[in-house]
Image: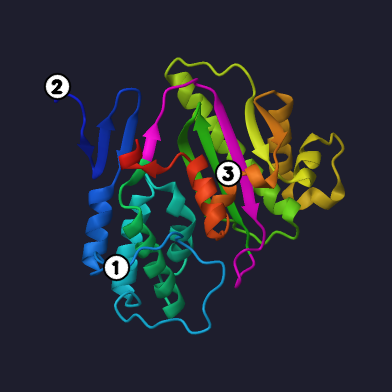
Amino acid sequence: MKNLGLAHRFLGIKIQKLQDKYFLSQSAYANSILNSVNLLHCNPLSNPSCTKLPDQVPNDSNLSANETYKRVTGSLQYLTLTRPDIAHAVNVLSQHLHEPSQTHAYLLKRLLRYIKGTLSFGLPILPGTLNLSTYSDAGWAGDPVTRKSTTGHCTYLGSTLVSWTVKKQTTVARSSTESEYRALAAATADTIWLKRLLNDFSKQHSQPIELFCDNTSAIALAHNPVYHACTKHIEIDHQFVRDHIQNQVIRLTPIGTLHQIADIFTKPLPTARFKDLRSKLTIQDESLV
């Protein structure tokens, strides 16, 4: 073994050690992605997604080519390691690798133009307590073709974002409560894994972990000791979440939709709302660190 000193760059991730924190970024990697598709000098955008597609989608023969689309989208998946603000947009693009259309090429170009304007953005590692807290949300029937919902959740260790997930649910949810409850079960499983990981570092998390949800029906279902027949199709998720609430592993806490940080992982958002949630994810410009 050899002591190489402090890490400055690891697998394309730049590691800056500042006075009271670390800062992780992938600006050089993002720059290489833009350069590979000749968008190094494109006009930047302030939002990686759009809430409404234009009537006439511009034709882009370069990005709509199957090989280029797959290569760039795959590269963007690695960029999400320090850029959770683009996780939902990348997830949407990744669902169409087999047959991208002009619409998907248009969305990919929008995302690349957003990255152009945020090249120096990254994820800080901040000092603070070692208490876990998780935000869970679901975008009900968000997929316009399959009508499957999208699960989104993120976990903080103190004030540092340490885990996030964006995933399309495997089955169609018949109500927003069902989709939210499936997201709660996934967030609970991920949070318990992080708690066990902390235990491996001899950091005991004795108090229940706060799990924030903005769906009052899902919260009521989780606390209801009576099992209803109408929830049999989510029986395993129902019992899983309730068991961990009763064992005081998690504490399900209601939160207003306006303050639900995981909303950024479940759907395209207006620019003002997107920027607000991006700041709550602690994603910031390297020059402002």
Label 3, on which residue? 261
Callout 2 touching callout 3 (CB < 8 Å) = no
Q: For mark 3, give the secondary structure.
A: helix
* Residue neighbourhood size for the residue with mark 3, other residues' Cα within 10 Å, grouped as few (<14), some (14–19), many (≥20): many
Magenta residues (range): 123-147
Q: Which of the two marks, 2 or 3, is nearer to us in this view?
A: 3
Report the residue at 29% width, 72% height from top: 67
| Residue underneath mark 2 | 3
Mark 2, secondary structure of its residue? loop
Q: CA distance from mark 1 to mark 3?
A: 30 Å
Identity, as a three-letter code, of the amino acid under mark 3? Ile
For residue 202, which quarter of the picture? top left
Return the residue at label 1.
Answer: 42
Residue type for callout 2: Asn
Total residue callouts: 3
Q: Amino acid at mark 1?
A: Cys
Task: Tell me, yes or no, whether the highlighted magenta stretch contains residue 286.
Answer: no
Which is more N-terminal, label 2 or label 1? 2
The numbered dot on residue 4 is: none
Residue at image location 52% in from the left, 16% down from the top: 204
Crowd rating for badge 2 (residues with CA inside 10 Å; few <14, some 14–19, many 20+): few
